[in-house]
Image (tube, grey):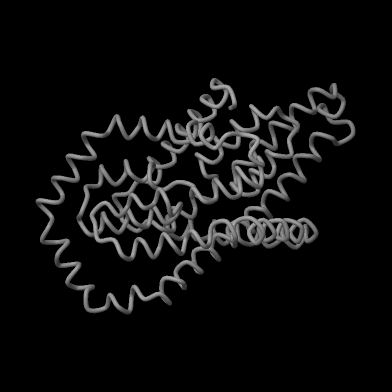
Amino acid sequence: MNKILSNSVRILLLFMAIVLLLTHTGLVIEGAHTGLELWYHSVLPSVFPFMILTSLLRNNLQSDNICYLGLLCGLPVGAGLIDQQLSAGSMSAKKANILLGICNITSPMFICGYILNQTLQHKVSSCYFMLILYLPMLLYACIHFRTLTENHTHSTSTKRSLTSDIIRQTSNSSEINHSLEDILLHCIRIILMTGIYIMLFCIFIQILSHYVSGIISEPGNLYSDSHDSIRHILHTVSHILLSELEITNGIRILDTLPLSLHLKTALIAGLTSFGGICSIFQTQSAITHSELSLYHYILLKVIFSISTILLGLLIPVF
């Protein structure tokens, strides 16, 4: 009964989405254009070459700690690596859930290329940005250092046979599965899926922004009759909330707000730490193991994001 009900709700939501798209064609086209333009001009050139190199590096590494490459590859690759390691029995579920919040993060190439170079235009020191971004995760890793190291030692000694069986099963097909062509196709698939997610969320942001702006400025509305400063605050807060939906367009939205460089940098760093709602959907698609908790991951991301914003506000920009 519950399954039928959930399926009916899903069908109803899909029909509502279709009607919404048909009645807001202009906003849909504008949002799709914005998303694809951001992907083509910003994400593709700054992330894709780095993704290929890190994938080649991952292909040549044979280690139980390969999941730490997620720090370089970015999300959702980090989640995929952790999921593979957990399925292979080379780490415990507790360790995997801890690492999911640490290793499944925004790619450093995206940070350096799109955020620091294109958006902030090197007005902020890279060291400052990396400090407020990675310090909360580093402290969290230090708190769980004993658990991480003990789990790794334990899994290596007790589950060696299972890992060996998996390696033997895949050794005969390794030349096919890990060829350069397959690595390139895998990278293309990830970058194209990222572009699709960006486009869909940009459409959603465009429609929501249209309605939010209409509510604030509608004649006769309580907010429209208020002082300009109140409308300015409502406009700023609403756009900060909208930016949390998708990181690429969200950073662009934050950059256009009339805020000080200090506050803007803190908010952008917080969004980078969180990754956006879109990144949660991407992470969910990369998780297949039932012991990996998406709720725990979201909680960690929220805590890291708030901590990053507070650090950005407390530490002067340099």
Residue 283 drawn above or below residue 176? above
State the image coordinates of residue 182 (x, y, percent, origin top left).
41, 75
Residue 174 drawn above or below residue 271? below
- In which image quadrant can residue 220 be found? top right
Residue that extends furthest to the right in the rendered view of this protein: 219
Quadrant, the N terminus:
bottom left
Closest to the observer: 3 or 34? 34
State the image coordinates of residue 232 (x, y, percent, origin top left).
79, 28
* Lateral position of residue 274 relative to residue 116, left or right: left
Quadrant, the C terminus:
top right
Residue 12 seen in the current view = no
Please name the residue shown 54% across and 35% down the image. 129
- In which image quadrant can residue 154 be found? top left
Residue 26 drawn above or below residue 221? below
Residue 286 drawn above or below residue 101? below
Closest to the observer: 5 or 13? 13
State the image coordinates of residue 59 (x, y, percent, origin top left).
33, 65
Please name the residue shown 50% across and 39% down the image. 273
Please name the residue shown 68% across and 38% down the image. 254
Please name the residue shown 49% across and 59% down the image. 50
Residue 57 seen in the current view = yes
